[in-house]
Amino acid sequence: MRVLLYGSELSAATAAAALSWVGHQVQWLPHADTPWSTLSQVDWLRSEPQLSAHLEQGLTDGTLQVIEQLADATTPEVIWLALSPAQRGAASALLEHVFEDMQLADQHGIVLINNSTFPVGETERLHTLMGAQHTSVALPDTLEEGRAWESFTRPTRRLLGCDDATGEQVTRELLRAFNRRSEVFQCMPRRAAELTKLAINGMLATRISYMNEIAGLADTLGVDVEHVRQGMGADSRIGFEYLYPGCGFGGPNFSRDLMRLADVQLQSGRYSALLEQVMDINEQKKETLFRKLWSHFGGELTGKTVAIWGAAFKPGTARIDHAPVLTLLEALWAQGVKVQLHDPAAVPALLAVVGEREDLLTFTHDPYQACEGADALMLVTEWKTYWNPDWHRLASLLSAKLILDGRNIYDPGFVASCGFIYRGIGRRADPKTL
């Protein structure tokens, strides 16, 4: 099929690579805010496993063409939108140009696939710009950052919002190569699909925040939250997914979808106290490691040095959108704490946000170098390289022997047996108690 793909989101790049890989003729028009010359060099795109290689393969094979302006596009059979919520106006402008300036009003069979996270009902509104002889579907973005290629080409599910048979048929054919292992489409009306995507992330965020609240209570009561988590997860009505306490979630899609769902509620006249609480709890949890550091040193933090492992909002990505490390750094700097930070991928993105802070922030190429001369270590992002450190080496580097585990990846008893004071999220252990 001939596909005109518009956008510079991760979902746009992944769709361009995957669709051209299976033989579709894809013309990709990146959004003007991030043209291909910029997009091709960003760390979050280049760090996605397999994605850059497949983009290069599509460009080499000729099944993928990157265009700089809409005038360079040929008549498409499918228009695929993968834009950010702030780019709704760009989507309207593109469709108006395609169906007016390019005089495609008499063409039949053009299908709009809206892969963007727009307000509920936006796919229907965009459809009005196309004409009744065309069709549109909502295909909400469900990619997982850090494994975007795998989640697109080997999906476990796809929400497909369609109100006519043509849209469903064309979308199924377009994605047929990725639907052979088992049936992954969940078909429903367009509005239902758009709301379902937001509702899913709202539920996942609620589970995380609830577990973080329980972890805080466990801390107060002297209970190891791991026992509570295991007991809850073993209940078949609850399960273990997204039941891990931590120092807050971030990300460009997860946080954005939660705020979008709250906006939908508000615009419909229904205030959501629950969603407000979920977001408030998450923002508070981003300061959890700082509060534990404050408590340990009795508020005397001026002149202290802290090592931080991990800045990305999750392992496997170079992005720091809404990442806990941003809140944590501000809290530490406000108390005059110097930070030595290591992250295998996200340092350029963090540097672009906070700038050079030679007096308060040092980036290191080695995780142990970040701990040299530090009083404590904060684990913020659970990159696999951090899971099994050399504890004896760390003991020689950290003057206060304090480990603040923001993801509960370490065993408290074992860490304490190595001579450290361990503080996790709802978990703790001291050497003297062993």
Image: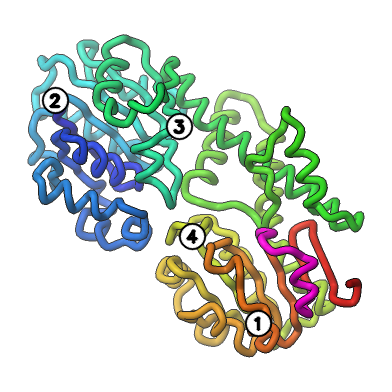
Instruction: Kindly identify the residue that appears in the image at 41 percent across and 19 percent down.
Output: 190
Instruction: Kindly identify the residue that appears in the image at 27 percent across and 56 percent down.
Output: 39
Give the amino acid type for the residue marked by disc 3 in the picture: Thr
- Cα–Cα span, label 1 and label 2: 65 Å
- Cα–Cα span, label 2 and label 3: 38 Å
Q: Which residue is mark 4?
A: 320
Which dot, 1 or 2, sits closer to the camera? 1
Which is nearer the N-term, disc 4 or disc 2? Answer: 2
Q: Is residue 223 left or right of residue 305?
A: right
Which is nearer the N-term, disc 1 or disc 2? Answer: 2
Give the amino acid type for the residue marked by disc 2 in the picture: Glu
Q: Where does residue 376 sit, x and y in percent of width and height?
A: 70, 79
Which is nearer the N-term, disc 1 or disc 4? Answer: 4
Q: Which residue is mark 2?
A: 100
Colour option used: rainbow
Q: Which residue is mark 3?
A: 156
- Cα–Cα span, label 1 and label 4: 26 Å
Which is nearer the N-term, disc 4 or disc 3? Answer: 3
Which is nearer the N-term, disc 2 or disc 3? Answer: 2
Instruction: Kindly identify the residue that appears in the image at 19 percent across and 20 percent down.
Output: 110
Q: Which residue is mark 1?
A: 394
Q: Residue 336 bears which disc, if any?
A: none
Q: Is residue 269 visible?
A: yes
Q: Is residue 217 left or right of residue 171?
A: right
The segment highlighted magenta reads: 407-421
